[in-house]
Image (tube, rainbow, N blue to C red):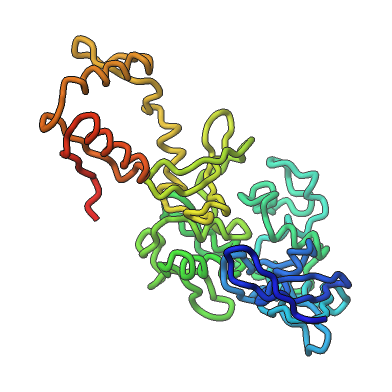
Amino acid sequence: MTTTDTAVAGEKTLKTITLSINGVKIEVPEGTTVLEAARRADIYIPTLCYYPDLEPYGGCRLCVVEIEKMRGLPTACTTPATEGMVVTTESAAINEVRRSSLELILSTHPCECLVCHRRERCGPNDICLRQVNVTDRCVTCPSNQNCELQEVVDYLGVHELSIPRDTKPRDIDTSNPFFDLDRNRCILCSRCVRACQEITGVGAIDMANRGYDVKVATFGDKSLMDSICRSCGECMVRCPVGAMKPKEITRPDKEVKTVCAYCGVGCSMYLGVKDNKITGVRGDPEGPANQGRLCVKGRFGIAEFVNHKDRLTTPLIRKNGILVEASWEEALSLVAEKLGKYHGDEAAMITSARATNEDNYVMQKFARAVLGTNNVDHCARL
């Protein structure tokens, strides 16, 4: 096997390598990790600390694999793929290590629901079929049916724990107006910490303390609202379990792709919709302007102003000193009539930073070419 070169028109030439995973030959760009190569070939390797846009971490130890001519069981997320590499993702030794790592994670996580083979039959108000005193169950978890830990538990078939559980209660931070940090559900994957450091560059949270006392915390162990947290939610969307979740959760019936209306950056997003109301927002990973990332306004503010009871849904015009509803044709005709009375220095145009560059260009063009004025200003003071 030899390394080959591939070239795409207008792009730099990339070297590719060929490796074998479970007997399947896979060709990937040089620099790809074993985990990324496996995902390209639709080969499942369990992991909880990995996230595509974060630096490899190797903390959960669930993605261990066997690699020919390599000692031990390296983590697939941190191991670069090399030419001719032969990888095995399933074996007795691999699954033993994965189950041991998973049991350690579950020992400090509410897991009665996860290890219960009857959970498919439970309802939100049913008494737990295993223990009457179990209140933290899968059907009451905000991440139920959207939990990566559930997926890993089912894949590895862990239904009993062979080690003692640490059930002491941990702090819950509810100070943030948009999302909560429930440390009882935290699995210490460090995704939230790395997102705050690598994606936003804020560093509001980090892993504090050692041993059994380790936890996600702010500087000085203050609340999120007393820290430098910007409430953007980038930490929340990368949480694989229910440790960081919005205060209000409603599962949407559908999603609608759109562009954020808060400013002119042009962030792409998906709006979750149920009963003709926005229930949530998530960034579009393919969005060229934001690559799936959103600010606090885009992530948490859209639903508030769109669903607000005072939102104007029809134009208003003033008649006899009173604002009354009008059709768009009537409103636009009135605006055109009023603007027609002004020309030159009698008129001025103020544009908005919340509009796109294209919209602002059209506005200033209208002012100069139609109204005949150079009195154009912009609300931004950058």
As rendered, which of 9 and 325 lies closer to the eye?
Answer: 9
Q: Is residue 332 above or below residue 89?
A: above
Residue displayed at 23% across by 44% down: 378
Which residue is drawn at the image coordinates 87% and 75% (left, top)? 91
Could you tell me which quadrant the C terminus lies in?
Answer: bottom left
Residue nearer the viewer, 175 or 262: 262
Residue 102 appears in view:
no
Q: Nearer the viewer, residue 64 or 217?
A: 64
- Left or right of 105, for residue 329: left
Which quadrant of the structure image shows residue 65? bottom right
Q: Position of residue 101 (x, y in %)?
A: 73, 74
| Residue 270 place in picture, x, y as percent | 55, 43
Q: Is residue 366 above or below residue 270?
A: above
What is the total number of numbered labels drawn onto the structure image? 0
Task: Name the residue furthest left.
Answer: 345
Task: Report which quarter residue 376 is drawn in.
Answer: top left
Q: Answer with left or right where residue 202 lies relative to residue 373.
A: right
Residue 64 location (% of width, % of height): 75, 77
Q: Position of residue 260 (x, y in %)?
A: 45, 43
Q: Examine the rendering and report whether any part of residue 152 can be seen.
A: yes
Q: Residue at x 88, y 76 (%)?
A: 92
